């Protein structure tokens, strides 16, 4: 957990340099390589193959600066790029978060997190009652930072002996309460759709609480059916490659869908349902193995440079705890 890494290194030399350098090494190379391909190679291939696939022709600075969620259409519908609104929210938050952690400290940080949770939930409610477009509520940083703040609270709890014991006992109840509340809210609203007011207000908060409970459960338990499922080799691999899967999946899925449509048009006697299922499975396998290759030959060599910016451990026990908790595809 990123907040936990910050808490463990807040008194170490080069606090800001180490954090931003490690974040840049993790996120920038793959992200900007993807953008470069979308600017050059992908449009050239689409033109050469005479496809009907759309390319992005807007202002690239929104994406180059991680502010795409604030553009006019909130990145919705931008060809091969629409999913980057969530990465923009995360990176905008973490621009300021190291300074907040440093200034607030462990004692005041829970109150900061509580303020963020209340403000985001309240703003979603106010905007929804005023008829603000649901995608604006869905994608803007100020209405989504409650989920990151809940993760920060989980990091704080796991680094306090008393709170750790309490959160370990409470984690199943938190997880089930959040999930149950979301199911009830979504069912009464007419479905789990963000465009529905109950879902985008209280429902979003309930879902975040449920996922926070899951994080606490996974971090405090060593046995159990859920833990065994989460620690299966395939789950660990997916977690390791998840950043590349996130970055590339939209491009791969869209292009595989186009190939499937082209095949069905050229060979109309081919059964449509099995063909679409084959395309779906093939696209997912392609994304997974592309991410695996990226991890081995591109990301891992770059990530090896992170050791140059690793903060000194305050103590052996604290270092072991940080190593166990700070397992994130974007850490």
Image (cartoon, rainbow, N blue to C red):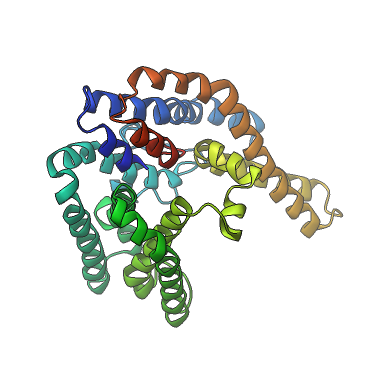
Q: Which residue is drawn at 52% across and 23% down?
A: 300
Residue 319 lies, in percent from the top left, at: 36, 33
Residue name at image x 67 percent, y 38 percent? 286
Q: Which of 189 and 151 is in front in this view?
A: 151
Residue 52: in sight, yes or no? no
The x, y position of residue 104, in whole percent, is 14, 44
Please determine whether, in this image, residue 226 is positioned above or below residue 155.
Answer: below
Give the residue at the far bottom of this rendering: 188
Taking the image as shown, residue 257 lies to the left or right of residue 104, namely right
Front residue of 264/165: it is 165
Please state if 276 lies on the left or on the right of 325 as rendered.
Answer: right
> Where does the image place residue 115, in percent across and percent down from the top left?
18, 58
**Quadrant location of residue 57?**
top left
How many tags in the picture? 0
Q: Nearer the viewer, residue 150 or 185?
A: 150
Q: Is residue 201 above or below residue 105?
A: below
Is 108 above or below relative to 58?
below
In which quadrant of the rendered view does residue 201 lie?
A: bottom left
Q: Where is the C terminus found, in terms of image quarters?
A: top left
Residue at 44%, 50% (x, y): give it.
219
> Which quadrant: the N terminus?
top left
Residue lying furthest right: 269
| Residue 166 visible within the image | yes
State the image coordinates of residue 225 (x, y, percent, origin top left): 61, 60
Quarter-of-image position of residue 322: top left
Seen from the viewer's position, the closer of residues 82 and 102 is 102
Q: Viewed as shown, does residue 193 lie left or right of 45?
A: left
């Amino acid at each position: 957990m990123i907040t936990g890494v910050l808490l463990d290194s807040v008194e170490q030399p080069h606090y800001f340099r180490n954090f931003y350098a490690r974040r840049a090494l993790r996120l920038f190379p793959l992200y900007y390589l993807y953008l470069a391909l979308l600017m050059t190679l992908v449009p050239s291939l689409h033109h050469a193959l005479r496809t009907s696939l759309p390319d992005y022709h807007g202002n690239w600075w929104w994406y180059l600066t991680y502010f795409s969620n604030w553009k006019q259409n909130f990145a919705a519908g931008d060809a091969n790029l629409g999913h980057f609104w969530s990465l923009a929210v995360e990176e905008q938050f973490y621009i300021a978060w190291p300074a907040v952690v440093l200034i607030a400290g462990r004692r005041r940080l829970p109150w900061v997190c509580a303020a963020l949770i209340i403000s985001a939930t309240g703003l979603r409610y106010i905007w929804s009652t005023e008829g603000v477009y649901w995608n604006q509520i869905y994608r803007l940083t100020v209405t989504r930072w409650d989920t990151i703040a809940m993760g920060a609270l989980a990091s704080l709890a796991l680094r306090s002996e008393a709170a750790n014991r309490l959160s370990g006992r409470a984690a199943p109840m938190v997880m089930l309460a959040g999930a149950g509340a979301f199911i009830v809210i979504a069912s009464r609203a007419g479905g789990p759709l963000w465009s529905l007011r109950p879902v985008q207000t209280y429902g979003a908060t309930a879902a975040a609480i449920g996922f926070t409970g899951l994080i606490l459960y996974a971090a405090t338990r060593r046995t159990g059916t859920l833990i065994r499922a989460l620690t299966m080799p395939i789950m660990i691999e997916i977690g390791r490659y998840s950043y590349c899967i996130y970055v590339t999946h939209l491009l791969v899925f869209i292009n595989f869908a186009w190939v499937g449509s082209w095949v069905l048009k050229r060979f109309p006697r081919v059964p449509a349902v099995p063909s679409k299922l084959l395309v779906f499975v093939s696209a997912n396998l392609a994304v997974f193995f592309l991410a695996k290759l990226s991890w081995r030959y591109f990301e891992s060599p770059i990530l090896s440079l992170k050791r140059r910016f690793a903060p000194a451990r305050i103590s052996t026990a604290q270092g072991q705890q940080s190593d166990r908790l700070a397992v994130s595809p974007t850490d």
